[in-house]
């Protein structure tokens, strides 16, 4: 480096605030994302928190090779798909909010972890503790829950055998776990089935080191199944509906998202087979003025989803666009915008406070 030079002189325009942010309308801010590797020809599966449902549907709609190991049966009308957990993700696992829940899902599918608890009572029937809202009505008996779960886990095992790129949207650091064996639930026991007992369940709020360890363990085990598997990580821009910490909910949200974003960035920097897509920043950054949130300042409007995917598809050109068959962004009517969000159900417990 010549005398008087320094590293900033070689930095591109995107490294500077004025050139990238201040000098642009917020809808025209460039350079949010540069892909690490292409998705073309890859078999892609998705999982994660609620926002991931938008990503999966648009990948499918734009002609990517999308894995769906539990497609809806022919006799079920499309309007009822979400009620039964279809068209949410690449399998009917429902929302997977935490890295520990994802790791245990893979372990359960491979027969490496069998939780002690196998059914929760709800009303006159029973539900699966690990996907309690996957059916609109409870099942008749615990045996029926067990049979359906076994079929599902076999499908999940096939998913990891077939998948070449696994897209995971990190949603939460908060979770409820079994004290006896550490099994992680997607919801607090007693809210969507079962009964809360502080002698059987405890609250955890995972730290950076735990989230990182869980994701690394998950990726290592998945790549033992398929050594060529790659991972595209995102962080959900949807804030917490409620927190079980003693913090105000916005403060709790910032902790959760900061940890998840830090882990995702670290892993993308460390591993060649991990990429990070900034859906969280594109929607929730202060430079966007909250433009992409509904009046509740929590749920993301359709225009926000489209803006996020515009930047994604600018780097990962959809097969349909290559063939001249479709717009880059699927419009209303092409993609069902309803999403299933178990965490949102916690809102009812705050009423009257």
Image (spheres, rainbow, N blue to C red):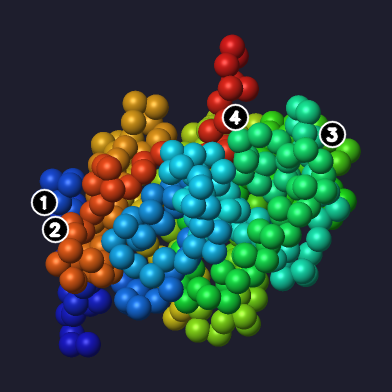
Give the total of numbered labels: 4
Q: Are marks 2 and 1 in contact (CB under 8 Å)?
A: yes
User: Which residue is at the front of the view, 181 or 135?
Assistant: 135
Relative placement, left or right, of 94 versus 39 is right
Q: Earlier in the sequence, mark 4 or mark 1?
A: 1
Residue 56, horizontal then vertical, whole percent: 41, 56
Q: Are marks 3 and 2 in contact (CB under 8 Å)?
A: no
Q: Which residue is mark 4?
A: 346
Q: Which residue is mark 2?
A: 19
- What residue is rendered at 58% in x and 22% in y? 348
Q: Earlier in the sequence, mark 4 or mark 3?
A: 3
Q: Earlier in the sequence, mark 1 or mark 3?
A: 1
**Residue 108 seen from this side:** yes
Q: Are marks 1 and 3 in contact (CB under 8 Å)?
A: no
Relative placement, left or right, of 249 versus 9 is right
- What residue is rendered at 54% in x and 39% in y? 83
Q: Secondary structure at mark 2?
A: helix
| Residue 151 drawn above or below residue 86 | below
User: Which residue is at the front of the view, 273 or 23?
Assistant: 273
Residue 285, horizontal then vertical, whole percent: 32, 46
Q: Which residue is mark 3?
A: 197
Q: Residue furthest left?
A: 23
Residue 325, horizontal then vertical, whole percent: 17, 63
Q: Quadrant of residue 1?
A: bottom left
Give the CA separation, mark 4 to mark 3: 18 Å
Label placed on residue 23: 1
Q: Earlier in the sequence, mark 3 or mark 2?
A: 2
- What residue is rendered at 39% in x and 76% in y? 42
Pair 4/1: label in front: 4
Q: Secondary structure at mark 1?
A: loop
């Amino acid at each position: 480096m010549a005398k008087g030079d320094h590293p900033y002189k070689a930095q591109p325009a995107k490294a500077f605030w004025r050139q990238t942010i201040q000098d642009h309308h917020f809808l025209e801010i460039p350079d949010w994302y540069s892909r690490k590797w292409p998705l073309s020809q890859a078999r892609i599966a998705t999982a994660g928190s609620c926002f991931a449902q938008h990503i999966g549907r648009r990948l499918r709609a734009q002609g990517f090779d999308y894995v769906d190991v539990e497609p809806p049966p022919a006799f079920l009308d499309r309007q009822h798909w979400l009620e039964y957990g279809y068209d949410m993700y690449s399998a009917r696992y429902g929302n997977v909010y935490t890295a520990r829940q994802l790791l245990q899902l893979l372990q359960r599918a491979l027969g490496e972890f069998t939780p002690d608890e196998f059914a929760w009572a709800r009303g006159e029937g029973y539900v699966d503790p690990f996907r309690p809202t996957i059916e609109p009505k409870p099942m008749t008996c615990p045996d029926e829950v067990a049979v359906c779960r076994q079929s599902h886990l076999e499908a999940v095992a096939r998913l990891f055998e077939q998948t070449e790129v696994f897209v995971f949207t990190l949603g939460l650091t908060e979770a409820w776990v079994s004290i006896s064996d550490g099994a992680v639930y997607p919801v607090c026991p007693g809210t969507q089935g079962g009964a809360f007992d502080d002698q059987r369940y405890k609250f955890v709020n995972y730290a950076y080191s735990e989230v990182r360890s869980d994701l690394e363990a998950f990726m290592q085990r998945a790549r033992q199944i398929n050594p060529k598997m790659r991972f595209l990580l995102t962080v959900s821009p949807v804030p917490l509906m409620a927190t079980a910490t003693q913090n105000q909910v916005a403060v709790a949200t910032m902790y959760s998202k900061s940890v998840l974003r830090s882990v995702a960035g670290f892993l993308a920097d460390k591993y060649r087979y991990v990429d990070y897509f900034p859906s969280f920043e594109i929607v929730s950054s202060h430079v966007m003025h909250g433009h992409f949130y509904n009046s509740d300042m929590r749920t993301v409007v359709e225009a926000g989803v489209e803006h996020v995917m515009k930047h994604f598809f600018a780097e990962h050109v959809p097969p349909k666009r290559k063939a001249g068959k479709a717009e880059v962004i699927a419009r209303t009517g092409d993609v069902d915008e309803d999403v299933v969000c178990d965490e949102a159900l916690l809102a009812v417990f705050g009423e009257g406070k």
